[in-house]
Amino acid sequence: MGQDGNSVRRREFLGLAASCGAHLLWVGGGRSPFAFASDVAARDRVVQEEPWGRLEAVADGIWALISTPLTGDRTTLCNGGIVAGRDGVVMIEAFATPTGARWMAGEARRLTGRAPTHVVLTHFHGDHTGGIGGCPHGSVMRVTAGTRDLVLQEDAARPPADATTRAALLADAELLAPAEETWLDLGGRRVRVVPRAGHTPSDVTIEVDEPSVVFCGDLVWNRMFPNYRDAIPSRLARDVRALTRSRETRYVPGHGPLADARDLERYTALIDDVEAHARRAVEAGRPAAEAAAEYQVPAELGEWMTFSPRYHEVAFTAWERDLTGSPR
């Protein structure tokens, strides 16, 4: 699936423009994004560090890429990971750019001795799919039909000269079951790909039961306010709560540092608080933009960064749409 040439730079930019984090402009609490990024320490052993992120060893044969785009480098932009077994290796996400995908595939080879045999995409947004052209030849791309179709829809809406090749590269992807788990047998390790929704109509999580690790995609954000651009808000909290496990678990969010149960509880409290405020606004007949302008994250939930100053309004607008049944 390799892709090179000068046109890649423009295509990479277009992929970012359709992503969850295209702006990187605003910071809560008055601090610079560089200060915030620098003091979010790694939870686990760092096996590789680059300007765009760090690769942390979460468990034996499992690594999480924690992207650090607030430092200014958007090569990967979203988080992702590697899960290895005796016979296969899963790369989670294609990232924002082909350069990012190629780098991650190279890290899989370095750490496991083999190229990724599978690439699983959690949803269609450009910061998770823009790098498809950099995924390794011979790997099996696994996506939902919804992700494939939404990528096709996004690319078709662009001028022909600006269209990316994401949809063409997904033409031969293997489709995940729409309503039940898909199991990937990697040899001595099985990985569950679980269909969900909330961040988009076609999300999946990638889950390992032993040890307990969940790659959440953008259903979960940690210390960064989530993007509701394509959200189904009434579904979001339910599917986030479904990720809770009774034993110690590492959660790899779509954006932000690695999370544990306490982080997941704080994130759930945040989206519950947004829901409560949005519902009151709709009941009072207040416009989403007006209610969002007054919204503040409760101090007890700590500091939350945001990629864009409009993310509160996007969230309240999504709830207004969900509660009133109004069209997009």
Image (tube, rainbow, N blue to C red):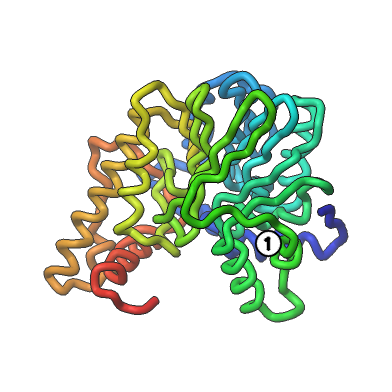
Above or below, comparing residue 62 to residue 128 in the picture = above
Q: In this view, does 237 lie to the left or right of 305?
A: left
Residue 115's x, y, as percent?
80, 36
Q: Is residue 37 left or right of residue 172?
A: left
Local crowd at mark 1 within 10 Å, few (<14), some, or many (≥20)?
some
Above or below, comparing residue 22 to residue 84 in the picture = below
Note whether residue 69 is visible: yes
Q: Identify residue for label 1.
A: 13
- Determine which quarter of the picture holds residue 157: bottom right
Locate the C terminus by quadrant.
bottom left
Q: Is residue 121 left or right of residue 194?
A: right
Looking at the rendered structure, the kind of residue marked 1 is Phe
Q: Nearer the viewer, residue 84 or 43?
A: 84
Above or below, comparing residue 190 to residue 224 in the picture = above
Residue shown at 75% from the left, 38% from the top: 116
Q: Nearer the viewer, residue 73 or 243?
A: 243
Residue shown at 70% from the left, 57% from the top: 173
Residue 160's x, y, as percent?
74, 80
